[in-house]
Image (spheres, helix red, strand yellow):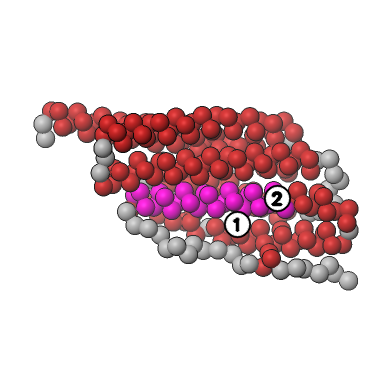
Amino acid sequence: MSEQSEHLVKSFDNDLKKLTDLLLRMGGIVESQVSMAAEAILRHDAEAATRTVEEDLKVDALEREIEQFVIRMLALRQPMAADLRLVVAALKVTGDLERIGDYASNVAKRSVVLAQFPAGYAMGGLSHMTGLVREQLRSVMDALGHADAEKAIEVWRSDRAVDDIYNTIFRELITYMMEDPRNITPCTHLLFIAKNLERIGDHTTNIAETIHYAVKGEVLPDARPKGTSAAFAIVRPKE
C-alpha cells in the first residue's frame, strides 16, 4: 500500500471513530433523558421533568451535526461495501435516537400533569417497564460502541417483554377507568406515558436491527418478536 493510500485509510478510520463518538454522545444524552423521565413519573420529580425537556435541544443539535458529518464523509470519502453500511447506519441511528428523546420529553411533560392527581393506582408495572426500556437502551448503545451484532440481537429479542408489560398496564388502566370515572383523566395520561415508553422500546429495537445490518451485512427477519395484542381487548371491571 502506498503512503498516500495509507494516509487515506487512516483518515477514514479517524472519521469513523469520530462518527461513533458523536453517536455515543447523543445516545448518552438520550439515556439520561429516559432515566430522568422515569424519575419524573415514579417520584413526581418536576425538576427531573424540566431537565428532560431541556436536554432535547442538545439531542436535536447533535442530530444535525451528525447528519452534516455523514454528508461530508459520503462526499469526500465515497465509502463502499461495509464502510458505506456503517456510515449510512449512522443516519438511521440518529433518527431513532432523536425520536427516543422526543418520547422521553413527552413522558416528562405528562408526569407534571399527572402529579396533580392523587395516586389511586399501582405504579409497579410502569416502574418495571421504565426499567426494561432503560436497560434496552443501555445495551444497544453498548452494542453500537463495540460493533457487537450478537448483543444487538439480544436487544431485538427483548422487545416482546416490553410489549407484554405494556399490554398488562393497558388492561389495568382500562379497568381503573371503568370502575371510577374520576380515574379517567389521570389514567389517560398514564396510557400515553406507557405508549411512549413502548415506542422508545420500538426505536431501540430499530437501532439494534441497524447495528446488526451494519456489522454483519444481514437483515434480520421482518417479523420481530412482539407481545400479544391483548391490549386491545376490553376488560370488564370485577363485580
**Which quadrant of the view contains residue 55?**
top right
User: In the structure shown, which secondary structural element does the residue marked by tag 1 occupy?
Assistant: helix
Is 20 colored magenta in this rendering? no
- Tell me, yes or no, whether the highlighted magenta stretch contains residue 193: yes
Q: Position of residue 23 (x, y in %)?
A: 44, 36
Magenta segment boundaries in residue numbering: 191-215
Q: Is tag 1's residue or tag 2's residue first in the polypeptide sequence?
A: 1
The residue beneath circle 2 is 192
Residue under label 1: 162
Q: Is residue 167 left or right of residue 113?
A: left
Going 89% across and 58% down the picture, which residue do you hit?
Answer: 180
Q: Is residue 61 visible?
A: yes
Q: Quadrant of the N terminus?
A: top left
- Residue 22, horizontal then vertical, whole percent: 43, 32
Left/right placement of residue 82 relative to residue 196 reads left
Number of numbered discs on residues = 2
| Left-right relation of 219 to 187 | left
Q: Identify the residue at image location x=67%, y=68%.
A: 230
Query: Label 2 amino acid?
Result: Phe
